[in-house]
Image: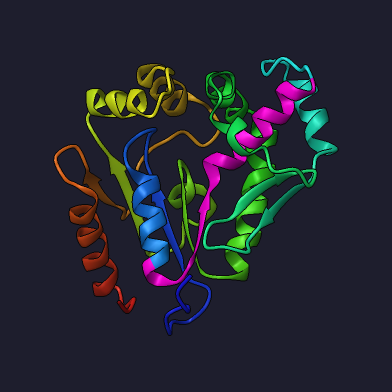
C-alpha cells in the first residue's frame, strides 16, 4: 500500500452503485492510488448473511436475525490495503461469493436493525482514517457530508453479463428491485454525486473521470 497522500484526515470518498456496475474495481484502484483504505461495505452485509445462514436462521425472520445481530461481533483486518471483514473473529473468505449468500443478502440488508448496526461500524472506521468506501448508501446515509461522492452505474444487460462472467447466477433485475424499493436506505444517487455510466468505458477511463473530479476538489494525485 502506498503511503497516504498529504491531505487533512480523515478523507472519505463515497462510491455507490448497483451490483456489477464496476464500483468495486474503481474503489479498489482509487484507494491504492490515494493510499487510502478500501472498504467494501457490501462484504459486511454478505458476511452477516453468511452468519445468519450458518446459524440455520431464515433471513426473513427479522426477530431471529436481530437477536443474532446482538451477539455478533464485527471486526476488520486492516493489515493490507483492503479491509477484510471478520465475523466473531472468523474470515468467511470465499463463502461470501456463494450463490446462497448472494440470494439472501438483499433480504438481510433490508433489515433496519442490521443497517443501523453496520452503518455505525462503517462510520467508526471512516472517522478513524481516510477511506474509499463503496456500497449502496455511503453518500446518502453513512457519510452524507463528504463532498467526494460518486454513483457508478451501467446498463442492466451489461451488469448481468458481468455477473455471469464472474460465475454468479443471481438476477440483476431482482437485486435492483430489492435494493431500490427497500424502506431502509434504498439505493439512489446521493445529492451532489458524480454519476458515471461504465457501460462503454474501461476501468482506466472511469478512474480518469473520478480523479479529475477529486483533483478539482483538492485531493492530490
**Could one spot residue 108 in this view of the protein?**
yes
User: Is residue 153 shown above or below 11?
Assistant: above
Provide the residue span drawn in magenta: 33-55
Q: Residue at x 36, y 61 (%)?
A: 30
Residue located at (78% from left, 21% from top): 63
For the point 36% across and 27% down, which residue is it?
163
Q: Is residue 52 magenta?
A: yes
Work out whether 75 lies above or below 7: above
Q: Quadrant of the C terminus?
A: bottom left
Residue 9's spot in the image, x, y percent?
52, 78
Vertical position of residue 99 compared to residue 131: above or below = above
The residue at the far right in this view is 71
What sort of colour scheme is used for the picture?
rainbow
Residue 208 against residue 89 in the figure, above or below: below
In the image, taking residue 26 as reference, residue 170 lies left or right, namely: right
In the displayed image of the protein, which residue is found farthest to the bottom? 6
Amino acid at each position: 500500500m502506498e503511503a497516504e497522500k498529504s491531505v487533512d484526515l480523515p478523507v472519505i470518498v463515497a462510491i455507490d452503485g448497483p451490483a456489477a456496475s464496476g464500483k468495486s474495481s474503481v474503489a479498489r484502484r482509487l484507494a491504492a492510488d490515494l493510499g487510502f483504505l478500501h472498504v467494501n461495505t457490501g462484504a459486511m452485509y454478505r458476511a452477516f448473511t453468511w452468519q445468519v445462514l450458518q446459524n440455520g436462521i431464515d433471513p426473513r425472520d427479522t426477530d431471529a436475525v436481530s437477536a443474532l445481530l446482538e451477539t455478533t461481533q464485527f471486526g476488520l483486518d486492516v493489515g493490507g490495503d483492503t479491509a477484510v471483514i471478520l465475523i466473531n473473529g472468523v474470515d468467511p473468505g470465499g463463502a461470501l461469493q456463494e450463490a446462497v449468500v448472494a440470494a439472501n443478502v438483499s433480504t438481510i440488508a433490508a433489515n433496519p436493525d442490521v443497517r443501523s448496526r453496520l452503518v455505525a461500524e462503517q462510520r467508526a472506521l471512516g472517522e478513524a482514517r481516510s477511506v474509499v468506501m463503496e456500497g449502496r448508501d455511503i453518500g446518502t446515509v453513512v457519510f452524507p457530508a463528504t463532498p467526494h461522492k460518486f454513483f457508478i452505474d451501467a446498463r442492466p444487460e451489461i451488469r448481468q453479463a458481468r455477473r455471469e462472467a464472474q460465475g454468479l447466477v443471481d438476477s440483476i433485475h431482482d437485486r435492483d428491485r430489492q435494493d431500490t424499493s427497500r424502506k431502509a436506505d434504498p439505493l439512489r444517487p446521493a445529492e451532489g454525486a458524480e454519476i458515471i455510466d461504465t457501460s462503454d468505458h474501461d476501468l482506466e477511463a472511469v478512474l480518469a473521470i473520478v480523479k479529475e473530479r477529486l483533483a478539482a476538489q483538492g485531493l492530490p494525485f
